């Protein structure tokens, strides 16, 4: 009687492969362009650095000639006196309200209009789009008097609504969103429609998630315009309680010409939110410039 010997086959133990350079984030070596871009970027940063250092300088340093770049000592007297001697918190709140409303309305209205001009075919769509884009070439100064008369007729002058309504939607926002939607493949939307998704469902479930870079870029441009707007609020708003930040600082500068530490502190407060928002959304900004054909 023969016995059958069982042989065990040893299976290789699955081991985790060691991390290699390809699995880790590769370190990009600086190219020759960095030798040019780094000093150029520093040149653009010098005014911001000087403004920030001036806001922390004592008043005695800012009246010297030439004004020292680095303060003799760091102090927060400029910020303290600014908050005590002005309504900057109220101005900051009004500007924040105007900017948030402008961003939300831009993202909703411009995305809807841009998608309609990019995908929906209806009579007069091409003419309507070019008519809207043509308004970009009209100087803003020519529209101020008619806009003021129209706002006065509806009772918006000297209210915060006068600063909000002009930023509800812009021709550039519609143009930007349309160009981005044209770069998206239409096959994705057609497949969703064949699966039973409605046109609104395609827009909210398919198109908008893919349009995040364009929406972030539109939010950046809208924030820059609404936050830094000075000329129109200067014409349409006279009540100090509804001053925007730029209008309040301009009025504050008229009475505090020699207190440079306070003015520099106000400029830092007005500039810091824009820089932080741009640093947060710079990747989406670059992606939109690539896909929408607006680079260069």
Image (spheres, rainbow, N blue to C red):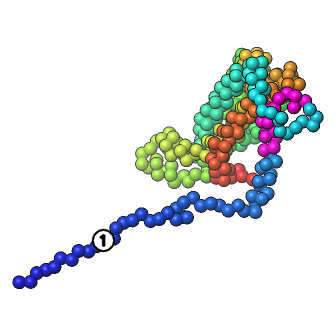
Q: Position of 86 compared to 195: left or right?
A: right
Residue furthest toward the bottom?
1
Quarter holding residue 26: bottom right
Depth check, front residue: 112 or 87: 87
Q: Is residue 55 magenta?
A: yes
Residue positioned most to the right: 65
Residue 272 location in percent, x, y?
71, 35
**In the rendered view, would you say 272 is above or below 159?**
below
Residue located at (71% from left, 50% from top):
294
- Residue 226 image offset from top left, x and y in percent: 71, 32
Q: Nearer the viewer, residue 248 or 178?
A: 248
Give the main secondary structure of the magenta stretch. Answer: helix
Residue 1: image quadrant is: bottom left
77 in relation to 220, above or below: above
- Residue 65 is situated, as x and y percent measured from the top left of the image, at 94, 34
Decide: is 160 above or below 11: above
Front-lying residue, 43 or 159: 43
Q: Secondary structure at mark 1?
A: loop
* Label 1 CA crowd tier, 10 Å (few <14, some 14–19, many 20+): few
Q: How many marks?
A: 1
Asked if residue 191 can be seen in this view, the reply is: yes
**Residue sitting at the far left:** 1
The stretch drawn in magenta includes residue 189: no
For the record, the magenta segment spans 45-63
Residue placed most toward the observer, 158 or 68: 68
Residue at 77 percent of width and 21 percent of height: 81
Task: Judge whether residue 145 can be spotted in this image.
Answer: no
Q: Name the image quarter holding residue 207.
A: top right
Residue occupying image coordinates x 90% and y 36%: 67
Q: Which residue is mark 1?
A: 11
């Amino acid at each position: 009687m023969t016995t059958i010997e069982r042989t065990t086959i040893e299976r290789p133990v699955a081991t985790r492969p060691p991390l290699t350079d390809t699995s880790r984030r590769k370190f990009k070596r600086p190219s020759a362009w960095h030798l040019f871009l780094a000093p150029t970027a520093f040149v653009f940063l010098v005014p911001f650095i000087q403004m920030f250092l001036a806001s922390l300088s004592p008043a005695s340093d800012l009246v010297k000639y030439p004004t020292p770049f680095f303060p003799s000592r760091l102090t927060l007297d400029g910020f303290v006196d600014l908050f005590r001697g002005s309504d900057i918190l109220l101005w900051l709140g009004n500007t924040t309200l105007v900017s948030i409303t402008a961003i939300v309305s831009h993202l909703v209205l411009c995305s809807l209009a841009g998608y309609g001009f990019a995908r929906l075919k209806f009579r007069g769509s091409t003419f309507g789009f070019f008519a809207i884009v043509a308004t970009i070439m009209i100087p803003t100064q020519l529209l101020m008097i008619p806009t003021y008369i129209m706002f006065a007729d509806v009772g918006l002058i000297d209210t915060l609504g006068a600063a909000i309504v002009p930023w509800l939607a812009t021709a550039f926002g519609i143009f930007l969103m349309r160009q981005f939607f044209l770069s998206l493949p239409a096959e994705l939307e057609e497949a969703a429609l064949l699966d039973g998704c409605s046109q609104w469902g395609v827009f909210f479930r398919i198109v908008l998630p893919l349009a995040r870079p364009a929406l972030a870029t539109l939010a950046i441009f809208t924030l820059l315009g609404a936050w830094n707007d000075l000329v129109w609020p200067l014409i349409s708003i006279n009540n100090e309680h509804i001053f925007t930040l730029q209008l309040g600082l301009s009025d504050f500068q008229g009475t505090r010409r020699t207190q440079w530490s306070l003015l520099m502190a106000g400029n830092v407060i007005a500039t810091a939110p824009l820089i932080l928002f741009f640093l947060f959304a710079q990747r989406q900004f670059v992606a939109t410039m690539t896909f929408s054909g607006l680079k260069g």
